[in-house]
Amino acid sequence: MTSKETSVSQTGVVDSACKQPAGATAVLVLANGQVFWGRGLGAEGEAVAEVCFNTSMTGYQEILTDPSYAGQIITFTFPHIGNVGTNDEDIETITPSSRGAILRMDITQPSNWRATRDLDAWLKSHNLSAITGVDTRVLTRLIRDNGAPNGCIAYHADGKFDLEALRKKAADFPGLNGMDLAKEVTCAQTANWNEKRWTLEEGYQSEENPEFHVVAVDFGAKRNILRSLSSQGCRVTVVPANATADEILAHKPDGVFLSNGPGDPAATGKYAIPMVKALLDQKDLPIFGICLGHQILALALGADTKKMHLGHRGANHPVKDFTTNKVEITSQNHGFMVDKDSLPENVEETHISLFDNTNQGIRLKDRPVFSVQYHPEASPGPQDSQYLFKRFRDLMANRQK
């Protein structure tokens, strides 16, 4: 980047040697010393994490509350974030796990009949910091070309920053490779879930007459996944990530669900992978995994996972289902992937990304077990991927015959 002074209302990007622009109350400092100036939003403070980007045009509240973003600061490529405000319903977990947000434009007054407060107030309530006025195109290109960097976001209303100290914090962040974050976002104890998906006519309703019982292993489960299971007529028992196979089977489930979650899937090897291996010994037990659950299942089957250069984060990802030859538009959020070349012979690849041909789904040839890398509970299609929950239901129904 060139060494020149710039106003925070222009590009929002300066070199670390440049003078701080007038009006700058927030800054993003990357581990390599690059500095992005802007204006602070939300709570004052500092946060260190991996900096990624998400290409979704809607759903920013769901994204910020997705537990899979633990250990990450989210750059939104869509410039108008905050335009529909926030509410107390469109959340994926009560306590957000993301560490901050980077926006192009200042937020506007919310324009939506469901909004209860603006994004600034919502961020403050969760002690999250954000920065606006950043040229997110520059930052996105940087991430695209070089991979997700470590960075430190800081918001001080007085505009006073120690850039070198912030750079060192970013440089000292260990990164997500080898990091087990599932144990940090999982539930503390077993709980029941019966809330169904939201509808315009009725909002959120409860499943009062479930046909099936699903045990959901919480590696960082999104609420709308649990709602989608409930909407298929399931009573859902949510158990912590470190639950053993014996503890899960003691609930006498009709099926087991492996949830999404953050971090390196291989780092769960001490508890999650042995648990899944033991469940696979129950040859007629339906198992369904999403995102991290997909990766953990693959590891338990003997495949490998690896960190991606960029990861997939957005709501416009085309995926082909080989079982139907249909293409669905999907929502995705993952920085690790299953190495398709490592899949054993008894595992069939069912889905691939049409962006980069990476693996997006698998199933076992000899038992009712399958998983996908993306998020079928989200609605970018808008309902392209809901069939997967019915597919899981059908496997449980066939088991009862």
Image: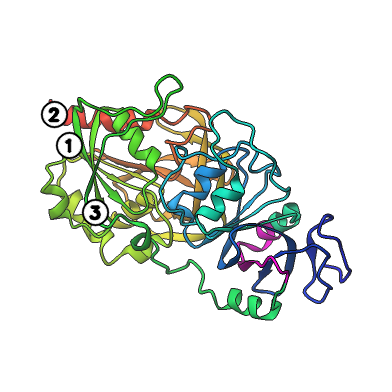
Q: How is the image coloured?
A: rainbow
Question: Which kind of residue does numbered mark 1 sit on?
Answer: Asp
* Part of the protein shown in magenta: 142-159
Residue, disc 2: 400
Mark 3 vs mark 2, CA separation in Å: 22 Å
Question: Which kind of residue does numbered mark 3 sit on?
Answer: Val
In this view, the residue in front, 39 or 387, is: 39
Q: Position of residue 166 (x, y in %)?
A: 64, 75
In this view, the residue in front, 167 or 367, is: 167
| Image position of 392 with respect to 338: above or below | above
| Image position of 2 with respect to 325: above or below | below
Q: Residue 128: within the magenta?
A: no
Q: Secondary structure at mark 3?
A: helix
Q: Position of residue 140 (x, y in %)?
A: 69, 55
Mark 1 vs mark 2, CA separation in Å: 8 Å
Question: Which kind of residue does numbered mark 2 sit on?
Answer: Gln
Residue, disc 3: 276
* In this rendering, the label closer to the viewer, 1 or 2: 1
